[in-house]
Amino acid sequence: MAAQRPAPRVLVHTRTTDYRHASIPYGIAAVRSLGAAHGFTVHATEDPGVFEAPLDPYAAVVFLSTSGDVLTPAGREHLAAYIDAGGGFAGVHAAACTEYGWPYYGEMLGARFARHPDHQPGRAVVEDRGHPATHHLPAVWEFTDEWYDFRANPRGSVRVLVSADESSYEGGGMGADHPLAWCRAQGGGRVFYTALGHAPEAYEDPDFRGHLLGGITWAAAL
């Protein structure tokens, strides 16, 4: 009888050296729950030393509301090598507020955070439902979040999945074209990012959980 293959492993990194989101423990719990239900295991850590070893054992790396500089120089090298060689990366919410001084990271992720208005209800427009992160969503997704603005619009270098309808909330700063979630290739790897996920209750929302699951499993090629 053939030995059973081990379940794929996903590394969830939540280190912060700047603003720390209260939702981080809820996000970890959500990813663990999704993994248990969908056949992958989760290693959650705040230890940058994990990145000083090769990341090959992981099907994907998730930066879950990380902030500031969270990697050592060796960790940066290993993460870049891992993604470029075919590894998966999923960034959630404040992952766009991370590693501002590392040009590769900004290019890999697709955009960097600039500002956000108050946490408030609004409408997200699902542009592309042909992706695991969006196939279950309605064409217009009512959600409550911080509606991140980015320093530059990533459209043209990413596949936009979801955009913000700035007419549905106060304080948007990007105008009529406001990408909010996307995916892209980086070398041989797959990169997914969603700006949503600020509040603890987001991680209990079935639509957002499906969005998160689809992004992670797509990045991991599961």
Image (spheres, rainbow, N blue to C red):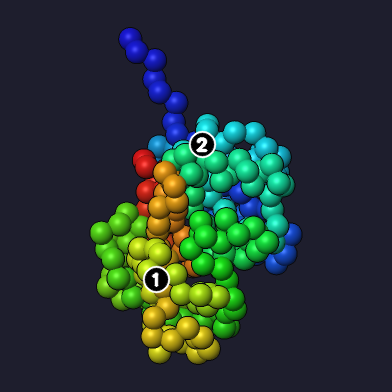
Query: In this view of the protein, can residue 60 be seen by the observer?
Result: no
Element under disc 1: loop
Could you tell me the amino acid type at mark 2?
Tyr
Front position in the image: 85 or 87: 85
Does 213 appear above or below 42?
below
Q: Nearer the viewer, residue 90 or 124?
A: 90
**How far across and how far down the image is residue 22, in percent?**
65, 64
- The residue at 33%/9% (across/down) is 1
Q: CA distance from mark 1 to mark 2?
A: 29 Å
Counting residues from the N terminus, which is met first, the one under dot 1 or under dot 2?
2
Is residue 8 in view?
yes
Q: How many numbered marks are there?
A: 2
At mark 2, the secondary structure is loop
Locate residue 156, reporting x and y percent.
37, 69
Res 155 label: 1
Q: Which mark is residue 58?
A: 2
Quadrant of residue 198 within the rendered picture: bottom right
Q: Is residue 170 above or below residue 22?
A: below
Please identify the quadrant where the C terminus is shown: top left
Crowding at mark 2 (Cα within 10 Å: few <14, some 14-19, many 20+): some
Camera-near label (1 vs 2) is 1
Q: Position of residue 194 (x, y in %)?
A: 46, 63
Q: Residues within 10 Å of mark 1 (few under 14, many from 20)?
A: some
Residue shown at 50% from the left, 86% from the top: 172
Q: Amino acid at mark 1?
A: Arg
- Of all residues, the one furthest to the top in this rendering is 1
In front of the other: 60 or 9? 60
Q: Which mark is residue 187?
A: none
Residue at image point 64% right, 33% down:
53
Q: Is residue 192 left or right of residue 149?
A: left
- Which residue: 37% across, 42% down? 221
Mark 1–mark 2 CB contact (< 8 Å): no
